[in-house]
Amino acid sequence: MTETMRIVVTGGAQGIGFATAETLLSENYEVIIVDKNPDTLKEAGKKLNCETANFDVTNETEVADFFASLKEIDALVNNAGIWIPQQLSEMSLTLQSEVIQVNLMGTVHCTKYALPKMRKTSKSAIINLTSAAAKTNSPGLGLYAASKSAIETLTQQWALELAPIRVNAVGPGLIVTEGTSANYEGSAREQRANAVPLKRVGEPLDIAEVIKFLISEAARYVNGQIIYIDGGVTAGTTGR
Ligand SMILES: NC(=O)c1ccc[n+]([C@@H]2O[C@H](COP(=O)([O-])OP(=O)(O)OC[C@H]3O[C@@H](n4cnc5c(N)ncnc54)[C@H](O)[C@@H]3O)[C@@H](O)[C@H]2O)c1
């Protein structure tokens, strides 16, 4: 009998993190969801019937204590992330440094402290969340896209440093979640869908399925890759 894999998913109370946890649980993995929001976390834990941990990934001490309290884990999904769109001229450096703290340093904290709990084998996996925004160079994103570019660099650096643990990243495109739903109200949804080669916006499950694959034995030789899941948005432009 094989042992059940244990996986930590950060930002798991809603959106892509929640769908990822749900998908992994349906494969009989053991999942612990981490989130800074106690209310949504509690609700998600009940819905999914899984373990929860309430802390903020920017708090190094809390991250260290959490991972120190765990037994061995097999995979880590660094999904917790925020975005604050702003033009450079109006940028609040305080707000944008929070983007760097959560997206970049949160990922660094969790990976650093998860590492001692992971076996040094290619069965162990780390999945980071980047974004199609790191590739499309859109205006007005504050430091969000830059934080995700840094994640891409670290994903490939860690794929070398941490091997045989496999480190990969997924880059969602336009995905409707609790965090982004305001962008898809009314006619905006259809407009956005029309900008996607596959002519639809994405849903959290589109991302969760690829994360599930990257954790699985089927991806045993996949390491250091950035996989955009965006219906083709980053493939280029059409209709020139
Ligand atoms: N939705 C999209 O279109 C999209 C596109 C590209 C990339 N992404 C990336 O996917 C990830 C998830 O996005 P989403 O749309 O599901 O977001 P969301 O806002 O719906 O959910 C994010 C969850 O992370 C939690 N979280 C935020 N900061 C945290 C912190 N400091 N510590 C612990 N938990 C924290 C939130 O409480 C929330 O439950 C993010 O990294 C995001 O950058 C999303």
Image: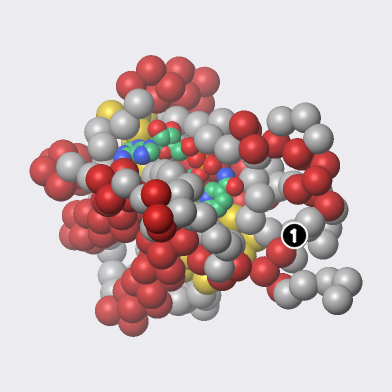
Q: Is residue 235 above or below residue 145?
A: below
* Residue at far front of view: 89
- Where residue 46 sits in the image (x, y, percent)? 46, 18
Residue 213 is at least partly visible in this image: no
Q: Is residue 158 above or below residue 49?
A: below
Between residue 78 and residue 213, name the one nearer to us. 78
- Where residue 104 sits in the image (x, y, percent)? 32, 58
Mark 1 C-beta closer than 8 Å to ligand 1: no
Q: Which residue is mark 1?
A: 231
Q: Residue at 64% across / 46% down in the picture?
A: 175
Residue 84 is at least partly visible in this image: yes
Estimate how packed mark 1 is, as few (under 14), some (14 to 19) or many (20 or more) residues with alpha carbons within 10 Å.
Answer: many
Between residue 17 and residue 234, name the one nearer to us. 234
Identify the element where label 1 is drawn: loop
Name the amino acid, label 1.
Gly
Q: Is residue 180 above or below residue 206?
A: above
Between residue 36 and residue 224, name the one nearer to us. 36
- Where residue 45 sits in the image (x, y, percent)? 43, 24
Left or right: 132 in relation to 40 = right
Q: Residue at 83% across / 58% down in the picture?
A: 198
**How does the figure colour the protein chain or chains?**
secondary structure
Left or right: 240 in relation to 87 = right
